[in-house]
Amino acid sequence: MSNEVIAIASDHGGFDLKELLKADLEEMGYGIVDLGCHDNSSVNYPDYANKMAAALLNDTAKRGVLICGSGIGISIAANRHAHIRAALVHDGLTAKLSREHNDANVLVLGGRTTGIEVAKDCLKIFLDTKFEGGRHQTRIDIMS
Ligand code: RB5
């Protein structure tokens, strides 16, 4: 169980996966802030990346999950914000490395490219894996 709140957002291409992962987060004992979208109607992914950026900036949550069809557009949009390190991952290994090496604070998934079981695996690993610091912190500092 955890008292941590996880922010989650998607466009229409990620909506179905977002709903499935919300159930998974609940099962793991996390609080959830759902920043939308709220159905399959067509929306613009940068708006949801911007909502995530605002939620992390005002401390609504410390970590988040973003999903669009491929994961590409929403990660590009999210990484325009200096306080976001959004990592588009495709499997458990990339999810693990996104935390250990990159201290990613936003997990990004493709709703049309990643199956539910792999996505659940990525989510759990992302949430459970610690940043290694050291030389990886030096590299992150260069980006700030
Ligand atoms: C929406 O059709 C789609 O372009 C979007 O979800 C995403 O894949 C963009 O990168």
Image (cartoon, rainbow, N blue to C red):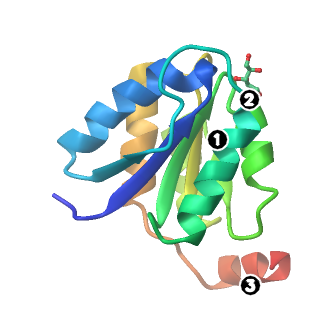
| Residue at (60, 70) in percent of width and height | 57
- Report the Cα–Cα distance between label 1 and label 3: 30 Å
Mark 1 nearby-residue class (10 Å; few <14, some 14–19, many ≥20): many
Instruction: Tell me whether circle 1 and circle 3 mark residues in contact (CB < 8 Å).
Output: no
Q: Which residue is mark 1?
A: 48
Q: Which residue is mark 2?
A: 44
- Report the Cα–Cα distance between label 1 and label 2: 7 Å
- Seen from the viewer's position, the closer of residues 28 and 102 is 28
| Residue at (53, 75) in percent of width and height | 132
Considering only vertical position in the picture, is 30 above or below 121? below
Image quadrant occupied by the C terminus: bottom right
- For label 3, the SS is helix
| Residue 142 spot, x, y in % from top left | 84, 81
- For label 1, the SS is helix
Q: Which residue is mark 3?
A: 138
- Seen from the viewer's position, the closer of residues 79 and 11 is 11
Of label 1 and label 3, which has the lower sequence position?
Answer: 1
| Residue at (23, 42) in percent of width and height | 26
Instruction: Tell me whether circle 1 and circle 2 mark residues in contact (CB < 8 Å).
Output: yes
| Residue 59 spot, x, y in % from top left | 48, 71
Residue 144 in view of the camera: yes
Quarter of the image where one finds residue 18: top left
Of label 2 and label 3, which has the lower sequence position?
Answer: 2
Query: With 132 as the anchor, is 71 left or right in this view?
Result: right
Residue type at mark 1 is Tyr
| Residue 56 spot, x, y in % from top left | 55, 65
| Residue at (21, 61) in percent of width and height | 2
- Seen from the viewer's position, the closer of residues 136 and 47 is 47
- For label 2, the SS is loop
Quarter of the image where one finds residue 70: top right
